[in-house]
């Protein structure tokens, strides 16, 4: 019988199961562990690192799980199971077999394999961890931090959707993401065959030097030096310090339509769920992604993508804008929305800094930015328009999460500067409409509309669906939750693309954070990239349900 809270030990092969050998291996390991704990140097060993004592043909691993208060003893069945590939980054031993299963199982069988293991006790968190780690180990954030790399970017979005969705459908987003990983893995194999290698141990700095070397490498856009430095930093630095550093570097430039800061937010949020013992490969992937650029080294050039970040950092240093005013002011929000229609990136950064210095509420400024982003989506529902909102979600999350008082206003200024850059990028994609979110009107027909009417109309006409939603919400503000829940349910059933999950999870989170007087219009604009009820169901829904039946 297994004691409550303990995992059963994997079966040891018959050839290795002699009683004396097993007892000896366990005793050797326990004595080594006791010696380590009582050693003066024990504090030098990160708690997330396994301590391995070799024993003949198999290894016994003592692993300290930071998510529990009890050290768990795990036995690997064979040396081959635990032996790392010298050309492949090693993961924590308790997750490696699952990641290999995800990597090696064919796309046509993976959902069924995972479903069978879930029915035998595989946990949600283990699946989430395996999915994220398979992505960072097998999919390169090049040539873009997007496209196939969405398989990594979308993991936390799928998790957010799953947690907010109904209990009986909670696995649908993760199973969709598992299938999506297999597609991305195949694309990566075709393009380059890249897989993450181990960090170069000879170049990993000491704890005392890791931060300094990381900052220097990131400032110089030096990929090799940053990879070594972040490995050292991930092993020693607290999560808050790491977050502040990555939020700074993830928001400094406007490349890859916001995917860098989106990756920062989603990576750290996912690590909070799966456990910080998995941080090193994730943060190595993240640092690599943040250093993506084309052509000349940005550290030595004055490029359009970097100019707003440098100007806004100087504004924060010069003006020391306040970021502690709490009361929202609708007038300020309306002014921001109006300015966004014509202002340049530099002008928006300057105006936002001045507004903060004069005591404007950050919430009012963020409200204006959220409305402006929604309006851009209304004007051109498409890949650039939707990223105005997913990028804003990430910047806003980082702003409200960071412990760095100087970084908080900088993130707001960057959000303000990025939106005109999105607006300019949309012009290269085709026609940009002239819709104004603050002039959206209710439907004038005599009739009572329902949430069901909204999503039925969405499959036919986005503008009419938005006006229908406004009519529903004006008639009964309590329908907000129903509108969001039904939109999420339709993503579960009909979502086929990473952006379905990234976008919906972002706007549904932000709807609760936008001031109430603007919330209805923000949600109405969000409909322009949600799924209507007339869209076909994803074939993965039936397959997922069958795998879990």
Image (cartoon, rainbow, N blue to C red):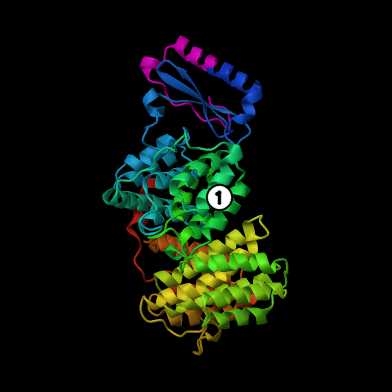
Q: Position of residue 349 (x, y in %)?
A: 58, 73
* Farthest-out residue, top: 20
> Is the residue 123 above or below the residue 301 in the image?
above
The residue that appears at 53% across and 69% down in the rendered structure is 308
Would residue 94 be found to the left or right of residue 397 on screen? left
Q: Position of residue 437 (x, y in %)?
A: 53, 81
Residues in magenta, as a range: 1-28
The residue closer to the viewer here, 464 or 288, is 288
Residue 548 seen in the current view: yes
The residue that appears at 32% across and 41% down in the rendered structure is 105
Residue at mark 1: 215
> Is the residue 437 above or below the residue 455 in the image?
below
Q: Position of residue 128 (x, y in %)?
A: 47, 46
The residue that appears at 52% across and 17% down in the rendered structure is 26
> Is the residue 43 above or below the residue 341 in the image?
above
The residue closer to the viewer here, 406 or 124, is 406
Residue 519 seen in the current view: no
Report if residue 169 lies within the magenta region.
no
> Is the residue 487 above or below the residue 189 in the image?
below
* Farthest-out residue, front: 300
Report if residue 10 lies within the magenta region.
yes
Residue 511 in which image quadrant:
bottom right
The residue closer to the viewer here, 403 or 14, is 403
Q: Position of residue 307 (x, y in %)?
A: 51, 68
């Amino acid at each position: 019988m297994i004691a409550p809270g303990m995992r059963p030990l994997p079966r040891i092969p018959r050839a290795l199961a002699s009683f004396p050998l097993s007892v000896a291996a366990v005793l050797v390991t326990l004595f080594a562990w006791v010696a380590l704990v009582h050693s003066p140097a024990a504090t030098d060993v990160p708690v997330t690192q396994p301590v391995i004592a070799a024993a003949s043909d198999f290894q016994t691993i003592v692993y300290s799980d930071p998510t529990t208060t009890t050290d768990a003893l795990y036995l690997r069945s064979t040396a081959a199971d635990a032996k790392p590939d010298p050309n492949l980054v090693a993961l924590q031993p308790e997750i490696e077999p699952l990641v290999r299963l995800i990597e090696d199982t064919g796309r046509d069988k993976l959902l069924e394999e995972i479903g069978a293991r879930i029915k035998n006790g595989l946990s949600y968190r283990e699946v989430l961890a395996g999915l994220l780690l398979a992505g960072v180990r097998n999919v390169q954030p090049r040539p873009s931090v997007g496209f196939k790399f969405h398989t990594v970017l979308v993991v936390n979005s799928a998790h957010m959707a799953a947690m907010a969705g109904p209990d009986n459908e909670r696995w649908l987003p993760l199973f969709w993401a598992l299938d999506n990983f297999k597609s991305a893995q195949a694309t990566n194999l075709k393009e380059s065959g890249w897989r993450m290698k181990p960090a170069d141990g000879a170049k990993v700095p000491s704890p005392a030097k890791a931060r300094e070397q990381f900052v220097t490498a990131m400032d110089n856009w030096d990929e090799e030096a940053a990879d070594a430095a972040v490995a050292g930093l991930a092993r020693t630095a607290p999560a808050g310090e790491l977050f502040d550093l990555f939020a700074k570097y993830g928001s400094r430039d406007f490349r890859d339509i916001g995917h860098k800061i989106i990756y920062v937010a989603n990576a750290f949020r996912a690590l909070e769920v799966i456990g910080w013992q998995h941080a090193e490969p994730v943060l190595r992937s993240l640092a690599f992604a943040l250093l993506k650029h084309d052509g000349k080294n940005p550290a030595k050039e004055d490029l359009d993508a970097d100019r707003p970040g440098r100007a806004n950092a100087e504004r924060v240093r010069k003006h020391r804008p306040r970021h502690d005013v709490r009361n929202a002011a609708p007038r300020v929000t309306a002014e921001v929305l109006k300015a966004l229609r014509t202002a340049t990136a530099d002008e928006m950064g300057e105006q936002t800094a001045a507004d903060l210095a004069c005591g404007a509420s950050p919430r009012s400024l963020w409200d204006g930015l959220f409305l402006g982003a929604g309006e851009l989506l209304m004007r051109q529902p498409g890949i650039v328009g939707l990223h105005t909102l997913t990028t804003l979600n990430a910047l806003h999350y980082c702003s409200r999460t960071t412990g760095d008082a100087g970084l908080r206003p900088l993130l707001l200024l960057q959000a303000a500067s990025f939106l005109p850059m999105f607006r300019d990028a949309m012009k290269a994609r085709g026609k940009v409409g002239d819709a104004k979110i603050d002039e959206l009107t209710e439907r004038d027909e005599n009739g009572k509309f329902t949430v069901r009417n909204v999503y039925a109309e969405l499959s036919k006409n986005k503008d009419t669906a938005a006006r229908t939603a406004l009519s529903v919400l004006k008639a009964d503000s309590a329908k907000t939750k129903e509108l969001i829940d039904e939109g999420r349910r339709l993503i579960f059933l009909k979502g086929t693309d990473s952006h379905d999950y990234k976008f919906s999870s972002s706007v549904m989170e932000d709807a609760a954070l936008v001031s109430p007087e603007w919330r209805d219009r923000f949600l109405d604009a969000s409909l322009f990239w949600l799924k209507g009820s007339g869209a076909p169901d994803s074939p993965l829904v039936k397959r997922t349900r069958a795998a879990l039946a």
